[in-house]
Amino acid sequence: MTIGSGVLVLWLLGTSPEQMQGGTPDPRVKPGQSFVVSFPGLPQTLAKKPSELHVFIPRKYDPAKKHPLFLWLNGNDGPPGINTGPVGEDHFVVASLPLYKVNPAEGLLLKNEDARYIWSCWKPMLAELERIVPNLNPEIRVVGGFSNGANCQAVLLNKVKEFADGFKGFLLWEGGNMLDNFKVLPAHSLFVLYGEKSLGKYGAPIALSASKAGADAEFFEMKGVGHDAPASFNPKVRDWIERKVLFKDLPEAFRAMTDAVKRSRWAEAVREYNRVSGVLLDDSREEVGPTKEAFRKISLAAEEAAGKLPGPEPTKATGAVWRKFVRDWSPCPAVEKVRAAVERQGEDDLKEVASQPETSRPKALRKFMEEWEGFAVREAAVASLEELATRELEGALSKPKNPALQHLLEKCAKEFEGTPSARKAQEKLQDLREEQASILLDRIKQMSSVPDRKRSLQDLIKTYDGTRAAAEARTLL
């Protein structure tokens, strides 16, 4: 698995509170705080600005809870900018990404051929968001956008399944009428808003086609409104998010939790409790009281289960059982004492790994990181692996640009997966691919034979998918 795909898996699946406890909190993640994350290694945006991720941390942020995510995309040339209006400022982490286009000279309107290029830029930004705020709720993620920001969603839904898999709800506000790949929308919610005096006639067919494909889709026409996204309609959007995303699965999860507790099916009870508690963002709903009572019973069962763990302390032979207890029963109070014992054993195991010869140490450290996901000791393993990765990357970058450099970067990215240096190696690899693809595309454009040119363009797209040149090649077929 490459660094990019590994990080993407984490992004799509989300990270649980117990996993979050294994790392050091980012100092920027404070209630009510907004900040900007720069990505100097990424290309210039459609707005002709450096690539940036904008993030807002909700006022009631709690690192011990999962928080929903709202991703906002601005219109026109799409400079990132936080918009908390549709979700409020209390509970949702709000982020904003820029827009990208293969050939900005042809106009601002995003097209299908821009989709993979956009996603290649977004993937490292979303992965970094996941790292900075590791307790994002994987079940409650909504992306919304106005005008060209809605168009961006449409082209990504058309061409990039990973994008559809990463979100539960999509908000198309005055845009997105080029959406035609409705088969990716079942099990998702879609809300389409258009102004009566704008392009309202395009909105209803989008929602209808999505509904026919199995999506939970709604259309709303903003009376008396042109091409605009007035704040007065934020309550309408917020109502849709609550009904169709935030609380949509709550009744089913609540029933499943209640039944599992009643029948002492504790693994299921913990799982469903985490689903239910993840959407009960305040004490206003009637499910809050019964959910607290369910958690009390689950916690008592966790205490009993903790007493049945093998031995007074974990050992090499029993460590996996103790770690499983922590993962299975979090966030019950009984977990913390067990976690502390597990961490002590992890520190001893890491000392043994760190004493191995340098040639075999990277593989052993990666295995350790996989086994100890969600525990603080994993961070120490990452730091140890990063020391080796830094030297490897510096050595690789001292080489001239040739096939040997590409091999060294690939080796660094694979061997030190999970470290900052491995991510840097992956970025350098992408830069090389962009450069190689661009040179090849220029040569293909000079071909006089139409069949040869078409065949070469298809080969370029297959080999260099995700680059700007591959995206441009699609427009030349």
Image (cartoon, rainbow, N blue to C red):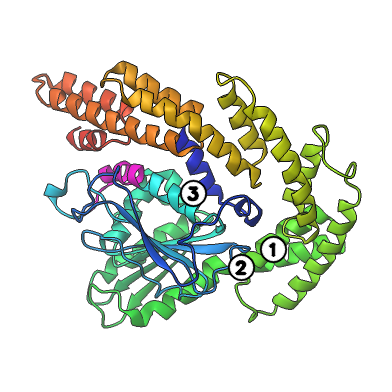
The residue that label 3 is drawn on is 165
Between residues 106 and 47, which one lies in front from this camera angle?
Answer: 47
Span of residues in magenta: 110-121
359 relative position to 439: left or right? right
Mark 2 is on which residue type? Val
Q: Is residue 111 magenta?
A: yes
The residue that label 2 is drawn on is 279
The residue that label 1 is drawn on is 253
Gap in angstroms between the C-alphas marked 2 and 1:
10 Å
User: Which quadrant would residue 444 be assigned to in this image?
Assistant: top left
428 relative position to 255: left or right? left
108 relative position to 54: left or right? left
Point out residue 14 in the picture as x, y percentages from the top left corner. 56, 51
Q: Is residue 191 magenta?
A: no
The correct choice, above or below, for 267 with respect to 418 in the image is: below
Residue farthest top in this picture: 404
> Which mark's residue is nearer the viewer, 2 or 1?
2
Between residues 93 and 249, which one lies in front from this camera angle?
Answer: 93
Q: Overall secondary structure of the magenta stretch?
A: helix
Is disc 2 surrounded by few (<14), some (14 to 19) or many (20+) residues within 10 Å?
many
Mark 3 is on which residue type? Asp
N-term mark: 3 or 1? 3
